[in-house]
Image (cartoon, rainbow, N blue to C red):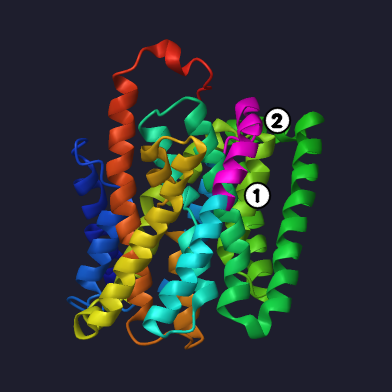
Amino acid sequence: MTFQTLAIISLVGLLGPLLATPQRWRVPVMLGELLAGILVGRTGLGLVDSSDPTLTLLADVGFALIMFVAGTHVPVRDAGIRSALGKGTARAGLAAGIAIVLGVATAVLFGTGHAPLYAVLLASSSAALVLPVIDSLKLTGPSVLQVTAQVAIADVAAIVALPIVIDPANAGSAALGATAVAASAALLYLVLSRLEKNGARLRLHRVSEDRKFALELRVQLTILFAFAALAVVSHVSIMLAGFSFGLAVAMVGEPRRLARQLFAIADGFLGPLFYVWLGASLNVLDLLTRPGMVLLGLVLGLGAVVAHASARLLGLPLPYGLLAAAQLGVPVAAATIGTQLKLLAPGEAAALILGALITIGVATVAAGVASRRQAGRPPGEFSGSTQR
């Protein structure tokens, strides 16, 4: 990888903020970055080599950091979120049940034999997408807390299940790896809580701020990389490593200064790099030569929308159910792992991403509808909510 490549990635990555600037469009920043990657990668101009080992490593770091930030967005310290866990779990379970039926039907229809994989994809949600959208649109109220719980539960469950269903031969080691990462996150929470209570974290913060050492950022990145290394060694996705670490930090309470530093790194450089790399790694032309895979992508996308829209049966307003359908991390990991292990048919990886893009488009529209509905209602209707 060269500085020229980094310059190209940084430049085309600006397409994300450019498309997201008109508020009426409500386009997620990552969508523009993904499209930019498609333009300069395998499908388009070929200016970015997604197989470059250095670029791939940086993209993995960006992915882990994105999932870490997503984990810190989960309002686990909010008393309201705990009361919403019951309904959130029930709705995630209903979506999973429907996803299993649709996943089996899809695998039979297309003859891929990937029913377990499709079921996990259809049931998954993306905390990395949904939670920032909720924050940016300032959506509040009991339904928001419930959909937040639903998305977090679905995301964690899918992250854990993905390595098991995509590579059944190594399911045992993947399950042990997921357990090891989860146990490490629980232990880290206990350590961080102790440091918070005895004032050690605050003393470190003061020294870092006075001397401009950025010690908190350095420590957090060290832990993140250690979690990612554990995930790689134990054959689970770095998604789980980043998200678990983020949840542990959220439970203790993320310092504002650290949040600003992470925002600069994740949203300013490594996040856009990851999405551009992802777009560059896709060969959308495979879809053009294989119409069946285009249809597969459409079915997966619409199937996920149907599965999550079922939450309306349990009292969740339809726009929030559609918002919960947004997918990203799990389809990306499935496409990446499946391609590396040569488990997917030609064009199937692109079909998985196409399905995810459909859910993002639907969720974007739904978020806009939810925002407009909230703006038109009296404030008292949302008195049960808490601001984050």
- Nearer to me, 181 or 347: 347
Can the viewer see residue 71 in this picture?
no
x and y, in percent, of residue 97 in the image: 55, 58
In the displayed structure, would residue 119 be above or below residue 358? below
User: Is residue 75 within the magenta segment?
Assistant: yes
Q: Which of pointers 1 and 2 lies earlier in the amino acid sequence?
A: 2
- Secondary structure at badge 1 equals helix
- In the figure, residue 293 lies in which quadrant? bottom left
Instruction: Decide whether the magenta segment is chiefly helix, strand or loop.
Output: helix
In the displayed structure, would residue 48 be above or below residue 374? below
Name which residue lies at 37% across and 49% down: 268
Left or right: 378 with respect to 105? Answer: left
Q: For the residue marked with disc 1, what is the amino acid? A: Val
Q: For the residue marked with disc 2, what is the amino acid? A: Leu
User: Is residue 332 within the magenta segment?
Assistant: no
List the residue tagged with mark 2.
Answer: 202
List the residue tagged with mark 1.
Answer: 219
x and y, in percent, of residue 284 in the image: 25, 76
Give the magenta-colored segment's residue range.
74-93
- Nearer to me, 311 or 79: 311
**Dot 1 alpha-carbon crowd within 10 angstroms: few under 14, some 14 to 19, many 20 or more:** few
Name which residue lies at 22% across and 76% down: 47
Q: CA distance from mark 1 to mark 2?
A: 14 Å
Can the viewer see residue 247 in this picture?
yes
